[in-house]
Amino acid sequence: MRRYVAAIITATVCWIPLSMQSTQAIYCYPGDPPAVYQACLNYNQGIGQQVNNQQQLMNIQNKIADTQGRINAIYALISSLNAQIAAQQKLIAQTQVAIDELNRQIRFTDASLTRLHAVMSVRGELLNQRLRYVDDHGSVNYVELILTANTFNDLMNRMVGTQQVAASDRKLLDELGVERAQFDATSAVLSNQRNQVNALLQQQLAAEADLEKNKETQKAALAYAAQLENQLVVQWRQVEAQRAAIDAQVAQLQLKYEAAARAAGGGTGAFEWPEPACGFGCISQGYGCVTFYLEMYDPSCPYPHRKHTGVDIAAPYHSPIVAADTGVIYFYPGSIGYGNMIMMIHGNGYSTVYGHLAGYAGGLSSGQIVARGDLIGYEGSTGWSTGPHLHFEIRVANYPRNPCIWLGC
């Protein structure tokens, strides 16, 4: 009974225009085949997430003030939507397979019913003929059989024949009863199969409607992401221009200070951890592909093709920063991306970067030789930073590499 009530409710919901519908759960009947029942459960489990997607998009648009925070959130939502849409498409395909299989079973069951009906019709006609004969001639008169028999053998033959006719009638009735029961059971199977198909079709329609809603949310999220990216283009171009200028200058510094740094003992390829107060456990972000739009462009990374070029070490504010290797120090105060930054030339193509510093160690100046392990600055949160941390890079031939290759983090 619950199943039919649920079917009426679902049919009423399907009649309402899609633009006016809210997502509805549907009743899942445990007696359905496992694939049918699981498809229904999967649909109901996905309803909350589908509603949450729309709410997330509204929150991103209305409650996150920072552009980069919005774009990070929108990328996460898009990634989640992509996964959900793929799962919904898979569920719809699985449900269609179940519907096709049930339709195949219905055809076989229908054919069995047709055969049973034909056999019952034949047996029913035979029974009708016997009943009409009995109605026309009356039941067997055993006294008449005895009185009209010519011999004892004739009497016995008549009695045996009468018993055989009666036995045949009983067999005909019994077989007709069995066939009727089989027909009723097969009819019940057919009705159940058709109910299952109807339930699956309702689930299929509901899942397809929710898939379209997710696609609409995905489309809106992609459009909003494009809008946010346009807002970041100017900022990113400024950062890229400064990054290119610093890289060009570093290339010149390497030519200028290479020999001096090497002579001082730098460029061996051995590096010290730059933040003695906080070890590997303080790494808040590693080297590699990220979604932060203002990072360095790298086409090998997935969209938006950005790469974090070092490791972020999040220690307490103003923690001491030391030189990872001996070399020539060079200061870049107030850079756009890394704020107060230090570049060190170590020789043999090696250089290191220290970004987001609160300030520099006293008594130092650009072009000075600094020994490995000497204090050079203090952790801060200058430039594009959401909290105190040190951005640390190791570069080879002026290209950032993963610092953990040398540090073992």
Image: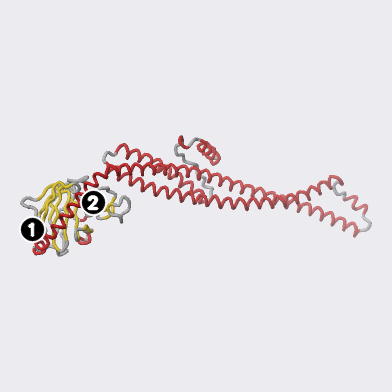
Identify residue for label 1: 369
The answer to which image quadrant residue 311 occupies is bottom left
Amino acid carrying label 1: it is Ile
In the image, farthest residue toward the right: 150
Mark carried by residue 284: 2
Q: Residue at x 19, y 58 (%)?
A: 398
The answer to which image quadrant residue 225 occupies is top left
Of marks 2 and 1, which one's residue comes earlier in the chain? 2
In the image, farthest residue toward the left: 363
Query: Dot 2 lies on which element?
Result: strand
Point out residue 202 in the picture as x, y percentages from the top left corner: 52, 43
Point out residue 222 in the picture as x, y percentages from the top left corner: 36, 44
Q: CA distance from mark 2 to mark 1?
A: 30 Å
270, 26: nearer the viewer: 270
Q: Residue at x 15, y 53 (%)?
A: 277
How many badges with numbers are in the image?
Answer: 2
Q: Residue at x 27, y 48 (%)?
A: 293
Point out residue 143 in the picture as x, y percentages from the top left corner: 89, 50
